[in-house]
Image: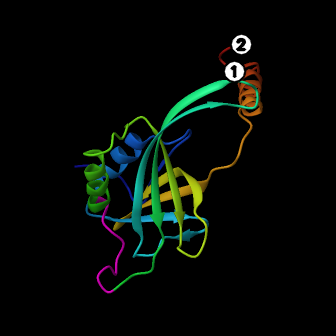
Amino acid sequence: MNAPALPMTLGFQEDASFGAVLDALAPHGSRRLVISYDGRMVQPGYHVTEVKAGSFVTLDCGGNPDAWQETILQVEDLPASAEKSEHMKVGKFLAILEKVAARVSLQRGSRLTFEVGPPSRPMQVFDVDAIRIEATQAVIELAPRPAICKPRHRAQQEAAKANACCKPTSECC
């Protein structure tokens, strides 16, 4: 059997979907689940306080309509306690989400968002940047979600694609 070399990092180029994160974590149920955010790791007593399934319909600053599904995991960053001295296992985390999915419609293709923070500070909103699999733990690496102007962002992406396509070394010219 060929086992992948560890650590192994699974990166997400676009917004990570709820299903993609579940699939990435599923084979690693016995590892501890650590969440990395804002330059720190969650403390071993962290708690998944709420799981939200949202459906958004919006109009951006350019007058463009948009709609998407989102799954939001709210995590309270708490220190270890006598009964919880280690980070929860991936299997327990997945069981929590399975229990929620039995009562709330969680869409596998929905955008996954984390709201994280200690009790003394406001929550921050994060996207999943990568999942790093190590020998004893799986680390969900979060990145802050920036505010963006969608029309300007789309125009910049289209310009970058057009410029990349017209280079002499490009196959599309």
Most distant residue in the top direction: 173
Q: Is residue 2 left or right of residue 155?
A: left
Q: Nearer the viewer, residue 15 or 164?
A: 15
Callout 2: SS: loop
How crowded pointer 1 is (Cα within 10 Å; few <14, some 14-19, many 20+) is rated as: few
Q: Position of residue 156 (x, y in %)?
A: 76, 31
Q: Count of labels shown? A: 2
Magenta stretch: residue 108 in it? no
Residue lying at 51% horizontally and 50% vertically, measured from the top left: 128
Q: Quadrant of residue 166?
A: top right
- Provide the residue designation for mark 2: 173
Magenta-tinted stretch: 82-90
Residue lying at 29% horizontally and 57% vertically, measured from the top left: 96
Kind of residue at disc 2: Cys
Note whether 48 is above or below 22 in the view shown.
below
Q: Nearer the viewer, residue 158 or 63?
A: 63
- Provide the residue designation for mark 1: 170
Note whether 152 is above or below 1 in the view shown.
above
Q: Is residue 124 left or right of residue 30?
A: right
Q: Are marks 1 and 2 in contact (CB under 8 Å)?
A: yes
Residue lying at 42% horizontally and 60% vertically, measured from the top left: 7
Q: CA distance from mark 1 to mark 2?
A: 6 Å
Q: Position of residue 47 (x, y in %)?
A: 40, 68
Callout 1: SS: loop
